[in-house]
Image (cartoon, rainbow, N blue to C red):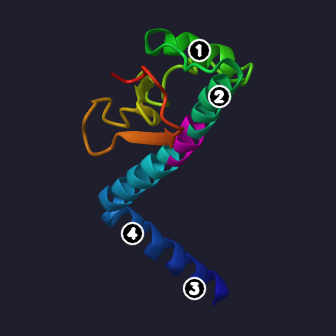
Amino acid sequence: MKRLMLMLTLIGFGYLCFANYRSFDACFGILENLTDTFFVRQEIKRVASAVEQEYITSQSYPSPRHFDDFIRGSLKTNVNSKRDPANDWWGTPYQFSVYDTGFGVGCAGPDKKWKTRDDIWIHRQQGKIPGVGR
């Protein structure tokens, strides 16, 4: 009897999975994007901290033109990782912007397009910096 109940449970579960595989696939896709976005946010925070440290030690921000080199030199990456640390998890280069009151570090997000809803930005405020961001 226990075996019959177990078999019927497994068959029922198999049927549910088969009948709803598209929904499960969509849910797993959403979950994967949320997980990736969380880890990218953590990485952007590390980049922003490196920028702040650079500003504290040199009283200037890294050059936006050479920001990729700055990231490669500032972030420690896993030796086995083949991913360029200057790019987000989806392969798009991080962007860096300097303003009068601070800076921002961002990535284009899963769609790899800038100025869309899934872009991820972290803004940090420093004091007013003369001659920067104009």
Pinpoint residue 87: horizontal percent, then vertical percent.
Answer: 49, 22
Q: Residue furthest front?
A: 130
| Residue topped by disc 3 | 5
x 45%, y 55%: residue: 31
User: Which residue shows up at 47% across the image and 41% down it?
Assistant: 122
Q: Of callouts 3 and 1, which one flags the residue occurring earlier in the amino acid sequence?
A: 3
Q: In this view, does 51 lie to the left or right of 103?
A: right
Foreground disc of the pair 2, 3: 2
The quadrant holding residue 59 is top right
| Quadrant that contains the C terminus | top left
Front of the two marks 1 and 4? 1
Mark whose residue sits in front, 2 or 4 = 2
Q: Residue 15 carries which label?
A: 4
* Residue indicated by mark 2: 50
Which residue range is magenta in the image? Answer: 38-44
- Label 1 sits on a secondary structure element that is helix
